[in-house]
Image (cartoon, rainbow, N blue to C red):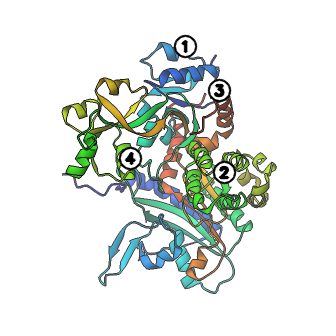
Amino acid sequence: MTGWLDDLTIAVPRGALFEGTVELLASLGLDTTELRGNDRKLLFEDIGVITMRPSDVPTYVEDGAADLGITGKDVLLERPGAGARERGRRQIYELLDLGYGRCTMVFATADRVNDRGEDPAAEALRRLGAMSVATKYPRIAARHLLQTGRQGEIVEVKGSVELAPLTGLAEAIVDLTATGTTLRENGLVVREEIVECTARLIANPVAYKLKAAQIDQLLARLRERIPARRAS
Amino acid sequence: MMHPIPSGTRDVLPDETRELRAITDALRAVFERHGYGEVYTPALEYEAVLANAGIAGTGPVHRVFDETGTTLVLRSDMTVPIARLVATRYPEVAEPLRFCYFAHCYRGTRPQWSQPRELLQAGIELIGSSAPGGTAEALTVLCDALDATGLKDYRVGLGDASLFATLMDRLQIAPEARAGLLETLASRDFVELEQRLEGIGASAEASALLLSLSQRRGGPEVLAEPPGPAADAIAGMRQVSELLDERVAARVIFDLGLVRSIGYYTGAVFEVYDPTLGVPIGGGGRYDDLLESFGAERPAVGFALDVERLHIALAGEERGTGVVVAPR
């Protein structure tokens, strides 16, 4: 059962979105047996699938090495230049909210307040003029501080962001959370919800035009499978 | 010993220069055959003069001061300088003027965006020839030029820059909401477009129409089903397509959602795609109001090709494919 929507190539994220993505592809009639069975293979030419880490998906799609891709909105928001659409920027088109992989990008601090009722970040902002924010998403964090009119220093870390406020590396974190369990277990509390993130279908602009019929056909089939978007 | 050059610039060595030269020679021969005379303009211009074009946000970013303290800019394209040239040197000429150019233009870059700061453009400007005839001529020169370079699988997307402005008028979308919608349309973030339309309380029909039109692209069937408010733009595209020779028409993809990021386009807009490259090779369109801003009201149309991208596409076609996964 090979041969899928003619010659479309799709970049599929390994990691948290992998299961949902494979299920979606399978529901479209794609033979995903090998995709599920072999987690070391990266390129599945028979079914037009390339697997990679989620943050690489926009890079492959932007270049046209993949026509389509699936990745989280968090990854798209963290792309260089995502906040400012400027002339000459290599583009990707965001076609569809696939609805799964729902997480929230949050601003969180330690679960305590001082006698003025300020959390550690607010206290630092008032007394020191700036708060320090640890995150794996420096651009989203910087944009959030800018949009809320606060000064801050962004500390970029690659993993276990929860550690930062506990050790004094930072007063606050900006991170993605699905259930909030990890935050709670580390004595952190969500102070602000920045943006809801779900899996998105993206397309290369040139492929979107040169393979319009195949892509539109796929979009129509995907829309049937996605529960109606709730008004947000 | 390494001596760096600015990000987004590069040195070009003889092998590459020879190949680029073959491309520009082929383009130049076609431009000249169609009556487009080559011009040079200064790389540096007065900022105040180019500012006549009034295209906030898309203008030049490299500025220097001359010895009198006047601000000079490095040109960011050739269309505005040629509009300036026409208004200055050919103020009274009524018949169409045809110019071509091969010139470096200068843009701003951001770290990690891998954008060129200096890019080599090849293009034409047809001044004093209105739609649809002028547009059809420009598209014909474009296809002849690309054919002459040996590029095989390219397609030309054709849209209309005025479509969404007209549409938003008809749909009575609040003026303050339009800029945001247009920006979202230009980046074709359909998820955000839907959210924005919800956010501004657009009617269900208006939302559905904007969403469906911005995604409508393909062959002549795109023009065959004219929805009411888009009728003018569609009629314009049909008039252009009727004037095209079969070999040119076969290259055209009608794309109602095509929105170029440059602000001076007024009517037909186009972009060149090749399957081996994930970004457009070039583009252009009608800019019927630009000359007026230099005091010489004339309809005009033109296009520019990015010579380096064209070179990459040619190399990609030669290799067989530009993508990792070969078409099955």
10 Å neighbourhood of mark 4: few (<14), some, or many (≥20)? Answer: some
Q: Could you say which quadrant of the image residue B118 lies in?
A: bottom left
Picture residue at 50% right of the left edge, 15% below the top: A36
Label 4 – label 2 distance at C-alpha: 27 Å
Instruction: State which tag comes first along the sequence, 1 or 4.
Output: 1
- Place of residue A75 in the rendered image (x, y in percent of width and height, measured from the top left): 43, 37
Does mark 4 fall on the same chain as mark 1? yes
Residue at which label 1 appears: A33
Q: Nearer the viewer, residue A154 or B99?
A: A154
Q: Which mark is residue A225?
A: 3
From what the image shows, is residue B141 above or below residue B197?
below
Residue at which label 4 appears: A144
Residues under numbered marks 1 and 3 in contact, where contact means CB atoms less than 8 Å apart: no
10 Å neighbourhood of mark 1: few (<14), some, or many (≥20)? Answer: few
Q: Which mark is residue B202?
A: 2
Chain of the residue where label 4 is placed in the rendered structure: A
Chain of the residue where label 1 is placed in the rendered structure: A
From what the image shows, is residue A67 above or below residue B100?
above
Label 3 – label 2 distance at C-alpha: 26 Å
Label 1 – label 4 distance at C-alpha: 42 Å
